[in-house]
Image: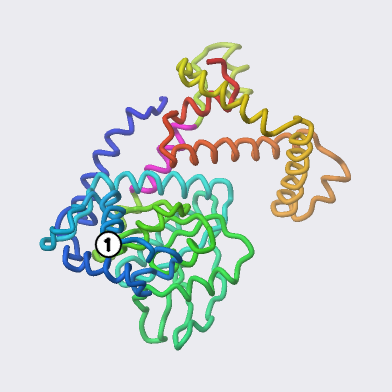
């Protein structure tokens, strides 16, 4: 049975119910309004505890920071509101979980490399640990660079279930410091996605690495970094709930990620007899989506502008050919041990299959990027255009 966006609505309703039941969002979260406003004042003053080490976040005024937070959590943006509990809209948390699950699943399914880290191990360690299990299940690799390294002045960088933490060798530390994240990142040559909070997220943001992060009501630096243009997917969520509260949240990420995969996957048409056997031997393409006339007109204008700026197609063709050759070499070396055996007896089918994997990954990344940018195009319309379907 084909899964549609409409059929995912019961999952969204269940997700909202779980978010409210676990109290990771809603009214009267752990940090009250007074503490949240104090965090903003600390950020404006450039205090490292509130900046998470992120460069440039202290350039904004108090009102600008509050507005950035309110845009994500939907708390009051009125600075005269100084009392009461902290607030995170459950709907905002749901939106963040959907975006995070899609992003994590996309990177993991193409064999991406992840780093996980938390400055809040007392409450969030189970969340990141079980998320790591899910990432591996989806095909991703989790790295653990600089294990045991000294974090000045007197802490150690350690990993629990591949989740980076700092320890004084007696306890796991709650920290906003970004030094452990810097040490961790210094130990890798490439990472595709960092899933972390506090200073671990801050270190990755400074280096322009894509990040998925949890943002509590007293984490203003994350909201400002997003406004500055960081490649950042934010899940607004109370990070001070009991460890067990986050297991249902990981389950939601799993189900949203798997639901998105089913929606994106092509579904073969029903047939019978010999024609059904023939259909079963070839991969089916998604049904064509008719593009609106205004969308077609915009794309024609955009294509002409790209053609004008790009110049002759031959130079682009040469660039893509070189890129494809490089990708194939790296793929063979990483997954076959060596590309020599394949090169000695070229297999056109294998080369085509590898090229298709790259093609599909580029298409999915384009869909994800445009979706995160809140494009007016639906995922199906983007797929239709990328597949050169007639509008």
The quarter holding residue 315 reads top right
Question: Which residue sits at x=55%, y=65%?
Answer: 143
**Where does the image place residue 251, in percent across and percent down from the top left?**
34, 50
| Quadrant position of residue 320 | top right
25 w.r.t. 3: above or below? below
**x and y percent of residue 241 in the render?**
24, 64
Q: Residue furthest left?
A: 84
Of residue 197 and residue 145, the one placed in the foreground of this image is: 197
Picture coordinates of residue 305, whole percent (x, y):
61, 28
Relative to 125, 108 lies left or right: right
In the rendered image, residue 255, in percent from the top left (x then y), is placed at 37, 43
| Most distant residue in the right direction | 344
Q: Main secondary structure of the magenta part?
A: helix
**SS for dot 1:** helix
Query: Of 221 and 12, which appears nearest the observer?
Result: 221
Q: Is residue 263 magenta?
A: yes
Q: Is residue 19 left or right of residue 139?
A: left
Q: How is the image coloured?
A: rainbow
Q: Counting other residues with Cα less than 10 Å from the Cα at mark 1, is it few (<14), some (14-19), or many (20 or more)?
A: some
Going 44% across and 66% down the picture, which residue do you hit? Answer: 54
Along the line of sight, the residue nearer the viewer: 109 or 151: 151
Going 73% across and 51% down the picture, which residue do you hit? 330
**Is residue 202 found inside the magenta-colored segment of the image?**
no
Read off the magenta span. 252-264
Q: Residue furthest bottom?
A: 154
Where does label 1 land, which residue?
62
Tell me the quadrant of the picture where the N terminus can be found.
top left
The answer to whether residue 162 is above or below residue 373 is: below
């Amino acid at each position: 049975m084909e899964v549609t966006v409409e059929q995912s609505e019961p999952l969204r309703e269940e997700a909202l119910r779980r978010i409210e039941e676990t109290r990771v969002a809603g009214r009267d979260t752990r940090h009250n309004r007074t503490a949240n406003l104090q965090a903003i004042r600390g950020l404006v003053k450039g205090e490292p505890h509130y900046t998470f080490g992120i460069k440039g976040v202290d350039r904004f005024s108090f009102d600008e920071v509050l507005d950035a937070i309110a845009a994500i959590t939907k708390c009051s943006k009125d600075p005269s509101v100084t009392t009461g509990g902290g607030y995170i809209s459950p709907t905002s948390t749901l939106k963040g979980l959907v975006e995070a699950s899609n992003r994590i699943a996309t990177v993991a399914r193409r064999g991406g490399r992840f780093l996980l880290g938390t400055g809040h191990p007392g409450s969030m360690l189970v969340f990141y640990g079980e998320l790591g299990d899910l990432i591996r299940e989806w095909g991703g690799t989790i790295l653990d660079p600089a294990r045991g390294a000294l974090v000045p002045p007197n802490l150690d960088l350690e990993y629990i279930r591949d989740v980076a933490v700092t320890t004084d060798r007696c306890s796991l530390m709650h920290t906003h410091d970004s030094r452990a994240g810097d040490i961790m990142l210094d130990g890798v040559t490439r990472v595709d996605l960092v899933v972390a909070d506090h200073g671990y997220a801050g270190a990755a943001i400074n280096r322009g690495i894509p990040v998925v992060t949890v943002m509590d009501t007293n984490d203003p630096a994350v909201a400002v970094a997003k406004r500055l243009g960081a490649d950042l997917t934010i899940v607004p969520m109370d990070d001070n709930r009991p460890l067990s509260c986050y297991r249902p949240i990981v389950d939601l990420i799993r189900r949203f990620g798997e639901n998105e995969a089913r929606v994106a996957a092509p579904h073969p048409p029903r047939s019978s007899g010999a024609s059904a056997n023939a259909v079963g031997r070839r991969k089916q393409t998604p049904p064509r989506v008719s593009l609106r006339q205004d969308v077609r007109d915009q794309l024609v204008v955009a294509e002409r502008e790209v053609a004008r700026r790009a110049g002759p197609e031959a130079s682009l063709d040469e660039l893509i050919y070189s890129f494809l050759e490089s990708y194939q070499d790296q793929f063979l070396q990483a997954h076959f041990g060596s590309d020599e055996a394949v090169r000695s007896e070229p297999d056109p089918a294998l080369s085509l299959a590898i090229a298709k994997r790259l093609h599909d990954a580029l298409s999915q990344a384009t869909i994800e990027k445009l979706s995160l940018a809140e494009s007016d195009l639906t995922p199906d319309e983007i797929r239709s255009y990328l597949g050169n379907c007639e509008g």
